[in-house]
């Protein structure tokens, strides 16, 4: 410790300013706490700078490019030219707008922001390393929200042309050929996006399907679209090694039959998962226990084994999603303020911004069948919906799963145009313990995609109007 | 911090009612729901409060 | 009556095959009734043939044309060519697909379809006029769903260039100049659509605002977009007379200052409301009472003053909307089948497919203030939402209105991108008597537009994360 380093005392210290940390900081400040937040990089965390927001910005731009380049509307012929550097600039402006927003929120809520890397030195003290120097902070309560980073495979070390999602999002050119190792949602979203921008994409996936966490019937529609863009998918394949030159990468992998193959591309993107940032925090010095996979153990209020330290987001068990991080951030802040808040949701939605979009909330059909004696399933296709037809977007379906005995909705999946927005109603329905009848009897506007939700409920009940099930 | 109790085993109640139960120091899982499909209502909570002593004064954490 | 004309007996007769009638027919058939449906024109009624569906198809095409013609995305430059005849063909193919769907549904549900115009001759008998001849039908129960037609103004009689919405939807060219008399939702939707296709549009509205049924702050955003397309709006204006020539129309009107003006255009579209088709049905011969504005009097089960005749849709009081017609259709069919169904909703959504879209459900702020001692209002802007920013769609807001005492949601409005889909969750919320807390505590996926709903609820509760309200 540097002599003369100041010891500051703060009421609530938040470490990490991602969607977990900055939301926790705001809620704590709203509840009257004096709050300090520290981040070693940018406000907004992975989500705003290297995750959700930049990826969705590129996805919108790719969609716009694609739909202008080859209009799917009879009678509208269009051509489009891409200036990818400008798209990147725009993407960055979107990120800046959002992170600038977080900055204003910090100011508006009178939250002190410190730039630096924190680690525990005592159960109630951290040290923060700045570019030039350091400082010590003693806290009454602390919320840890240090998030996660891409996993690096030993066999595929990151380099100039072997990229994690972070660098892929910031490439200033569209690769002619791109290999994606890992077909989870991040790999699929980015692979499809580059394919739309014109890359020849190959996805190498170890499991027997890309997007393996989702219903096969949903994934099939995404695969169909990927085929349209000439994306090749190798499933049950194992990446072995990579050779990087100045202008290209060569990946060696074994395919599903065990044969060794080599392909060349401009870039290789590795998206095989993320690892929690819990290894360099000095957690043992603070009495904070870490469990499986480096994830911090917490109770229902997000309290760690150190009663004055809370942990939220990607560093605790559960889905590594921004909205889970933010939700936990609110719970932790409220717990600190003495409110009886606990992590107490019936469901967390998961959305993939693929084309078509996929969204899921609550239980899948298989999961529900394990939990309930009998389930009702209602499925309704986009092709039978008037709005979808008038939008020329007829691929996809809405699927509702209910406990047959009570009729209560326990799960829902949507694949198709605007699935990301349709899922909102279904999440609320599950939280409200709505029954299929509640949903079927709620008047949904005509002609809207939401009518499919109502009709899927009627299918589940046995008497849908717009499809014949007998 | 994830939910470990399956949806199937949990009391049916809206987020607002669940929060209210915690404010009243009631373990909602002990309350019989009389609402539609067996949902726990505000009245059910009040009845429970007057009938039985709440089992715990700490917030009802799960898992 | 023609001698020898057959008298057929049927169990349930449905008159009119619009979204009210065909849905009623299907539900009655599902409940085991033997059903016959009669329509003098096409299956699907106004909605599928001359209303919701063709208008939304043209709106999508206009949106596609507009976004390809002048890409709003930096880095994507595009140009588009319009072949409006092909757009019309596509629109017709959408209509055909939907009406073909209704035909299959009739077949699948074993419903007999008769082509012809029906009118009552007795309380339990109708006569049906075909192209060549007629027939008599005696029914046990009848559901009347004859819908509505455009009002024709004496001063602006329809002609070759003075059009109702029906002809406007089928024009095979984009008018260079178009005048729209009546800025309700049909006039606004069609005016904006033609403006996007390139027409120079003028809207003449008698009230002090177009779309007067909606919140002024919502309408302002639509007006802003209309300005972008050079649409002129004359409010508090009165159309006086029209002069039609072979190639143009001349409209004379008085503007808000009382000054008389004349403008010329290629076409004049009159959308000043619709009139129920109840005048030529021989209702008096069947003991069916008609009330105000030609609307049929019904009870909570849609039963008319003739206990064996039900009436639904545009011919009964309430919003003239397709989803209301369908809802009533189900209620009437279930009532006939002896079920205790009644028209029993807390709210009906209304959507305008303008740009940006507008949607509303339940009470407006003003209405709520009249009904409740105190209300909580939560408003959240698109500009502060990550998904909206990444979509480059930052105009608009979500507004929630709750009874302050109980926190229960009583109304909601959305204006902005995909408002038509966001409103679905809010309709369900109102039907479920959800409180602002229920909505705020429901995890909404990031980054989605649905997060605005959650945040608007938090604004209503006083502690939003993503805007500073203090
Ligand atoms: C390409 C990509 C796309 C994604 N898309 C989505 C999506 O669409 N939807 C979704 O829900 N999720 C998405 N995610 C996941 C989402 O980004 C994370 O779940 C979310 O960011 C986790 O939030 P957090 O607050 O836990 O941590 P993070 O956002 O990871 O933030 C942690 C912060 O802590 C800081 N930090 C770390 N260690 C220290 C230290 N010692 N001292 C000081 N500061 C420190 C970091 O600099 C960082 O700013 C995506 C992720 C990626 C990579
Ligand atoms: C341009 C336009 C856009 C619209 N957009 C929307 C929208 O986006 N959303 C929305 O909810 N609503 C919209 N509407 C309104 C919607 O179309 C009507 O509310 C809906 O069609 C009413 O349904 P209905 O079943 O009552 O009657 P209708 O759809 O009017 O159908 C009545 C049927 O009865 C038949 N009929 C009439 N008299 C007889 C007779 N004597 N014998 C036999 N058959 C008869 C007619 O041929 C017709 O097929 C729109 C309307 C228009 C004009």
Image (cartoon, coloured by chain):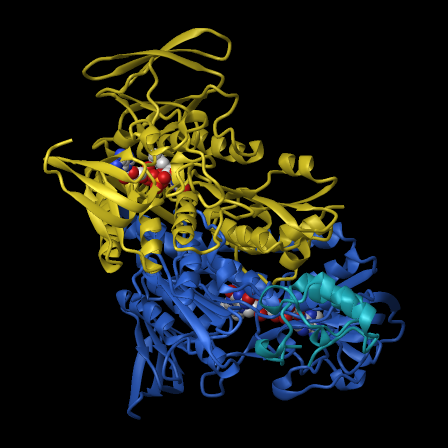
Chain colours: A blue, B cyan, C yellow
**Farthest bottom residue in view:** A258
Q: Using the rendered view, name the quadrant where residue A195 is placed.
A: bottom left
Residue C264: x and y in percent read 31, 14
Residue A439: x and y in percent read 49, 59
Q: Could you tell me which residue is drawn at 77 percent across and 61 percent down?
A: A28
Horizontal side of C125 relative to C184 (left or right) equals left
Q: Residue C405 or C213: which is nearer the viewer?
A: C405
Figure quarter occupied by ligand 2:
top left
Horizontal side of C222 relative to B9 (left or right) equals left
Horizontal side of A457 relative to A41 (left or right) equals left
Quick check: can you spot residue A41? no
Q: Residue C129 or C458: which is nearer the viewer?
A: C129
Residue A138: x and y in percent read 86, 72
- Position of residue C215 relative to residue A28, above or below, is above
Quick check: can you spot residue A164? yes
Horizontal side of A168 relative to C174 (left or right) equals right
């Amino acid at each position: 410790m540097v002599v003369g380093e100041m010891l500051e005392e703060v009421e609530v210290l938040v470490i990490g300013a991602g969607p977990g940390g900055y939301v926790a900081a705001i809620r704590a400040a709203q509840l009257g706490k004096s709050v300090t937040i520290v981040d070693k990089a940018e406000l907004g965390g992975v989500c705003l700078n290297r995750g959700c927001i930049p990826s969705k910005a590129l996805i919108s731009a790719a969609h716009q490019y694609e739909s202008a380049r080859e209009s799917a509307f009879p009678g509208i012929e269009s051509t489009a030219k891409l200036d990818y550097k400008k798209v990147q600039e725009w993407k960055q402006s979107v990120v800046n707008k959002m992170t600038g927003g977080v900055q204003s929120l910090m100011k508006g809520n009178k939250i002190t922001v410190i730039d630096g890397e924190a680690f525990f030195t005592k159960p109630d003290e951290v040290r923060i390393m700045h570019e030039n120097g350091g400082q010590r902070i003693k806290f009454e309560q602390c919320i840890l929200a240090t998030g996660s980073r891409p996993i690096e495979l030993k066999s595929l070390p990151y380099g100039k042309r072997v990229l994690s999602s972070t660098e892929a999002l910031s490439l200033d050119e569209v690769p002619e050929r791109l290999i994606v190792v890992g077909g989870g949602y991040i790999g699929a979203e980015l692979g499809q996006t580059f394919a739309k921008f014109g890359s020849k994409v190959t996805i190498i996936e170890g499991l027997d399907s890309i997007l393996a966490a989702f219903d096969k019937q949903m994934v099939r529609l995404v695969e169909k679209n990927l085929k349209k863009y000439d994306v090749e998918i190798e499933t049950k394949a194992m990446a072995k090694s990579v050779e990087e030159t100045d202008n290209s990468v060569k990946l060696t992998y074994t395919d599903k039959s065990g044969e060794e193959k080599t392909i060349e591309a401009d870039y290789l993107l590795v998206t095989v998962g993320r690892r929690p940032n819990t290894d360099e925090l000095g957690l043992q010095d603070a009495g904070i226990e870490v469990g499986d996979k480096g994830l911090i153990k917490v109770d229902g209020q997000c309290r760690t084994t150190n009663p004055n330290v809370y942990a939220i987001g990607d560093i605790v068990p559960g889905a590594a999603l921004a909205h889970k991080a933010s939700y936990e951030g609110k719970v932790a802040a409220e717990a600190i303020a003495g409110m009886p808040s606990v992590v107490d949701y019936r469901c967390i939605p998961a959305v993939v911004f693929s084309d078509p979009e996929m969204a899921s909330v609550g239980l899948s059909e298989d999961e529900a069948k394990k939990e309930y004696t009998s389930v009702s399933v209602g499925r309704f296709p986009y092709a039978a919906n008037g709005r979808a037809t008038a939008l020329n977007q007829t691929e996809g379906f809405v699927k509702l799963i209910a406990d047959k005995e009570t009729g209560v909705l326990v799960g829902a999946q949507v694949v198709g145009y605007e699935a990301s927005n349709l899922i909102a109603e279904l999440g609320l329905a599950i939280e409200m313990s709505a029954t299929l009848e509640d949903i079927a009897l709620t008047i949904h506007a005509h002609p809207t995609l939401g009518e499919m939700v109502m009709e899927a409920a009627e299918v589940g009940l046995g008497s849908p109007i717009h499809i014949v099930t007998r | 911090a994830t939910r470990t109790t399956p949806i199937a085993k949990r009391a049916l109640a809206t987020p607002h009612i669940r929060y209210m139960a915690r404010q009243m120091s009631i373990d909602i899982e002990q309350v019989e729901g009389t609402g539609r499909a067996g949902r726990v209502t505000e009245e059910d909570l009040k009845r429970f409060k007057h009938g039985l002593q709440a089992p715990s004064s700490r917030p009802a954490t799960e898992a």
